[in-house]
Every structure is written in C-alpha cells, then in structure tokens.
Image: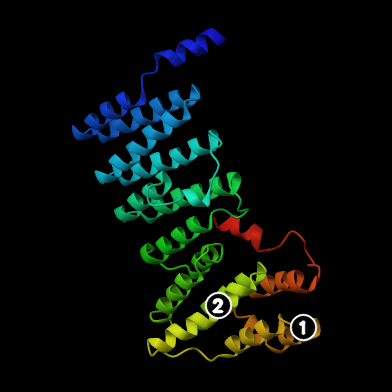
Amino acid sequence: MMLRERARRVTLPPVQENIDKLEKVIKDGNCYGAQQMYKSISARYISAQRFSEAMDLLHSGACLQLKNNQVTCGSELAVMFVEALVKAKVPYDDGNLGEEDDVHQLAEALAAAKTRVECCSSFLRAAIRWSAEFGPHRSGSPQLHVMLAEYLYTESPELDMAKITLHFVRGDDPKKFASTLVSFMGKCYPGEDDLAIARAVLMYLSMGNMRDANFLLSEVKQQVEAKKLEFPQSDLIHFISYLLQTLQRDAYPLFSMLRSGYKPSIDREPAFNEWLDDIGEVFYGVQRRNPLQGMFGEMFKIM
C-alpha cells in the first residue's frame, strides 16, 4: 500500500500545470467542464496530502469562475478551499487576514459578484467555522464576522438585523457597527430603531462586553446628532441606559427591579429575556434555570 501511495504522488504533476490547463478550459467557454475537473483534481492532491497545491488550485479556480460570472461554481470552489484548510489543519491567525490573504481575496471576489447573497455568506460562514476550530477565538475570527455582517447588511434583499447584529457583536469594529445601525435607523419602520439598538447592547452585555456596549450606545448617539436625526427616546432605550449604569455596580436587586419595571418593553422581543438571563449570570453569578440555553448556542443555530 505504501508503494502505491508513493506512486500516486509521483503521477501528480506540479499544480501550476493544472492551473494553466484549467484556465484555458475556462477561456474556451467550458466553465462547467472546468468545474468538474477542479473538483476531481483537487481531490487527488488532497488525497496525496499535497494540501498547499490543492488550495492553490481551488483558489485559482474560484477566482477565475467568479471573474467569468460563474458565481455558483466560484462559491463552491471557495467553500472547498476552506474545507482544504480544515483538512490540512492550517492555523488561523488574525495577522494573516490582510488584503493579500487568500481568504480575504476570495471574500472580496464573492462580494464583488453580488448576484447571489447565499454564495458569499456560505463561504464566510465556512471560513468562520475554520477560524473557530484552528484559531484563538472560540466564536471565530472577529474580522470575518464583521465582513459577513457588512455583506449581509448591504446585499441581503430582506434585512435580518438580528443575524447581522449577532455577527457584528462577535466582531471587532463597534464603530462600523454603530454606523450600520444609524444607516438602518434611517430606513427602518417606526418602532424598529430602538429594538435594533437594544438588541445590540444586550448581545454585547450577554457576552460580558461592557466596553463595546457603552461605546456603541455613545457612538450611535453622536452619529445621530451629527446627521441631525432623532435618537429614539422610548421606554426600551431608557431601560438600556439604566441597565448600563446598574451593571457598573454590585446591585443585583436593582437589576431585578429594572427587569420587572420595564417588562412590557423587554417583552417586545422574546430573545431579550434570554439575554438578560445571560447578563445576570455573567455580571452577578445568577445561575440560569436551563443551563443549555444561552446565546453562544444560538449563534451556531443561526450560522
């Protein structure tokens, strides 16, 4: 078996030969035929554990297919590229996700296509799962979360601010998140603006991230004022403001009173009570009734 395996490796040519050959197939207009060849040839390199060459082939193929407006084919190869990263156990490093990075280039190419939202989001979700498994962030790369949040906001035909918010709070750019919220406030239905702000603050707090929760609320207020818009002054916003002040103190009874006093506002969105349970556990050590519940599990349901 060892001899057969070695023979199989020897028969595989340098990957650049296949890259050049398949580029010609695409230029001749046979994108579908090239797609099948990309998949089968990359599988051979992976089987021979020549992961780097497999990834070079898949990266080249994804970019070429996308350049030729073959978005479904390109996104399929892009996801296969991430699967190869996982098989090769390539570690994720925040410092490597620059403009020259393969993952970043694929994300940009998919975003530029803009014809099928699910294609780009599927790739970014796969990349986030890879970064969670082989990187330092349990929830995945903050940069990739921001990229996905931005893409979903700008390209989705129907905005799902809960999903967009989930990725932004797992990200590392609360200022960009604040700008997105202000943009959303300018075009949402009445009564959705305060829900969006409260959802963002509560998600941050459920993760124990008091710094970004405070920053976000302050930044949204500043940007709204600069654009001469109206900042919502609902009971829900008052609750969020009081909550942020309360959590800076060892004042669990006051936390409970706030939840009780503002219950009608909190009940406007079912998830708010669950996140407040998380917050009670994070900041005051109060055990949840159901330990299997919580935002971290919900994140992967959405993803």
In the orientation shown, which residue stands out farthest toward the front? 95
Residues at marks 2 and 1, CA–CA distance in whole angstroms: 24 Å
Asked if 251 appears above or below 57 in the picture, the reply is: below
From the top left corner, tell me how far across and down residue 251 is, in percent: 79, 83
In this image, 277 relative to 114: left or right?
right
The residue where tag 2 is placed is 215
Q: Mark 2 packing: few (<14 Cα in 10 Å), some, or many (20+)?
A: some
Asked if 282 appears above or below 302 in the picture, the reply is: below
From the top left corner, tell me how far across and down residue 43 is, in percent: 44, 27
Pick the front one: 268 or 207: 207
Asked if 284 appears above or below 66 in the picture, the reply is: below
Q: How is the image coloured?
A: rainbow
Secondary structure beneath label 1: helix
Secondary structure beneath label 2: helix
At x 68%, y 75%, the residue is 273
Task: Let me know if residue 191 appears in the view.
Answer: no
At x 71%, y 62%, the residue is 293
The residue where tag 1 is placed is 256
Q: Please, what is the three-letter code of the amino acid marked with disc 1? A: Ser
